Image (tube, helix red, strand yellow):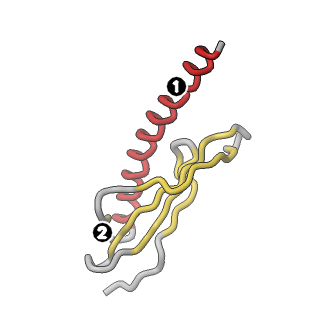
C-alpha cells in the first residue's frame, strides 16, 4: 500500500513540475506582451513564480493561481518590479507601476 502512495505522490509531483514549466512559458510571453504594450523594455527575459495558491474560475472549479514577478524599464536604467497572475493558463490580473515617459 505504501508503494502505491509513494507512486501517486511521485506522479503528482511530476505533473505539478511539468505544469509549472508550461505556465512559466505562458507568463514569460504575457510579461513580454505587457511590457511591449506599455512601451517598456522587458528585462532579463525571465519571470519568477513568487506565489502559488488556489482560486475558483467562473464555473466554480478550483484551479491553481500562480503569481509571477518580472522587471521592466522605461529608459533602460532603472528597474520596475511588476507582477501578473495566472489562474490555470489565463491571465487574471497584472500590475505595472506608474512611470515617467520622456
Residue at 58%, 15% (x, y): give it.
Answer: 3
Q: Give coordinates of residue 86: x percent, y percent.
A: 53, 50
Which part of the image, by quadrant, shows the C terminus? bottom left
Q: Nearer the viewer, residue 101 or 66?
A: 66
Q: Is residue 39 left or right of residue 83?
A: left
Residue ranking furthest to the front: 2
Q: Secondary structure at mark 2?
A: strand
Number of numbered discs overlaid on the protein picture? 2
Could you say which disc has been placed on residue 102 in the image?
none
Q: Nearer the viewer, residue 59 or 48?
A: 48
11 vs 88: above or below? above
Q: Nearer the viewer, residue 45 or 37?
A: 45
Q: Give coordinates of residue 69: x percent, y percent.
A: 45, 61
Residue ranking furthest to the left: 76
62 vs 48: above or below? above
Residue at 60%, 43% (x, y): give it.
Answer: 64
87 vs 83: above or below? above
**Closer to the camera: disc 1 or disc 2?**
1
Which part of the image, by quadrant, shows the N terminus? top right
Location of mark 1 (residue): 10
Residue at 52%, 62% (x, y): give it.
Answer: 94
Residues at discs 1 and 2 in contact (Cβ within 8 Å): no
Q: Secondary structure at mark 1?
A: helix
Tell me if mark 2 has few (under 14), some (14-19) or many (20+) residues whose alpha carbon lies within 10 angstroms of its own: some
Tell me if mark 1 has few (under 14), some (14-19) or many (20+) residues whose alpha carbon lies within 10 angstroms of its own: few
Nearest to N terminus: mark 1 or mark 2: 1
**How far apart are the two marked residues, 1 and 2, measured between alpha carbons?**
39 Å
Q: Give coordinates of residue 76: x percent, y percent.
A: 26, 76
13 vs 72: above or below? above
Residue ranking furthest to the top: 1
Q: Nearer the viewer, residue 77 or 94?
A: 77
Location of mark 2 (residue): 41
Amino acid at each position: 500500500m505504501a508503494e502505491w502512495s509513494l507512486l501517486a505522490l511521485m506522479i503528482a509531483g511530476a505533473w505539478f513540475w511539468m505544469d509549472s514549466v508550461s505556465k512559466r512559458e505562458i507568463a514569460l510571453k504575457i510579461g513580454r506582451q505587457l511590457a511591449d504594450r506599455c512601451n517598456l523594455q522587458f528585462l532579463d527575459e525571465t519571470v519568477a513564480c513568487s506565489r502559488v495558491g488556489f482560486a475558483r474560475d467562473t464555473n466554480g472549479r478550483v484551479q491553481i493561481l500562480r503569481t509571477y514577478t518580472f522587471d521592466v524599464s522605461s529608459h533602460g536604467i532603472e528597474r520596475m518590479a511588476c507582477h501578473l497572475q495566472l489562474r490555470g493558463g489565463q491571465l487574471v490580473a497584472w500590475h505595472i507601476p506608474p512611470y515617467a515617459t520622456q
